Image: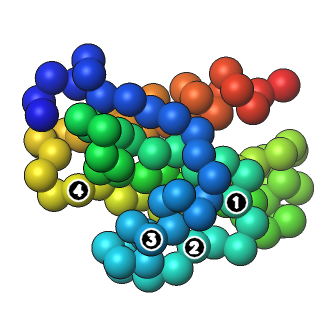
Amino acid sequence: MTDRSTWEIAEVNKGRVAPMIRASHYLHRMPAVVPCALALSVGGWIRGAVVWAIPPHETEKRYGGITWELARLWLDDILPRNSESWFIARAVKHVRVEHGE
């Protein structure tokens, strides 16, 4: 489980990670508008999720462009320390590569 080279990150339909968010995230619900959801699979099982959402319109004005917010982050407690940082770094890279301009 600690060999992160075998972990897989894939963009998925938000419905694929919604059950984990509803069951385990403290808000227990998905954001309304989800342009990207990522699943972290370990050994064929989803063990984490990052959900990107569209923030309020004022955010685009403030930062001068299209902005997404990391709205939900969930990782299974069986994953090792610093898995959250590892996953967030790769999620940001995924958005820049796959959805950047």
SS label for mark 2: loop
Quadrant containing the N terminus in the rendered view: top left
For the residues labelled 2 and 1, say whether their Cβ atoms are less than 8 Å apart.
yes
Q: In x, y percent, where is residue 69?
A: 63, 55
For the residues labelled 2 and 4, say whether their Cβ atoms are less than 8 Å apart.
no
| Residue type, numbered disc 1 | Val
- Few, some or many C-alpha atoms within 10 Å of disc 3 (few <14, some 14-19, many ≥20)? some
SS label for mark 1: loop
Which residue lies at the image location 24% right of the left edge and 35% below the top edge? 43
| Residue type, numbered disc 4 | Asp
The structure's colour scheme is rainbow
Residue 19's image quarter?
bottom left
| Residue type, numbered disc 2 | Met
Q: Say whether disc 3 or disc 2 marks the residue closer to the N-terminus.
A: 3
Residue 89's image quarter?
top left
Q: Is residue 6 above or below residue 79?
A: above
Mark 3 and mark 2: span between their CA atoms? 9 Å
Q: Name the residue under label 4.
A: 76
Residue 95 visible in the displayed image: yes
Q: In x, y percent, where is residue 39?
A: 45, 45
Q: Say whether disc 4 or disc 1 marks the residue closer to the N-terminus.
A: 1
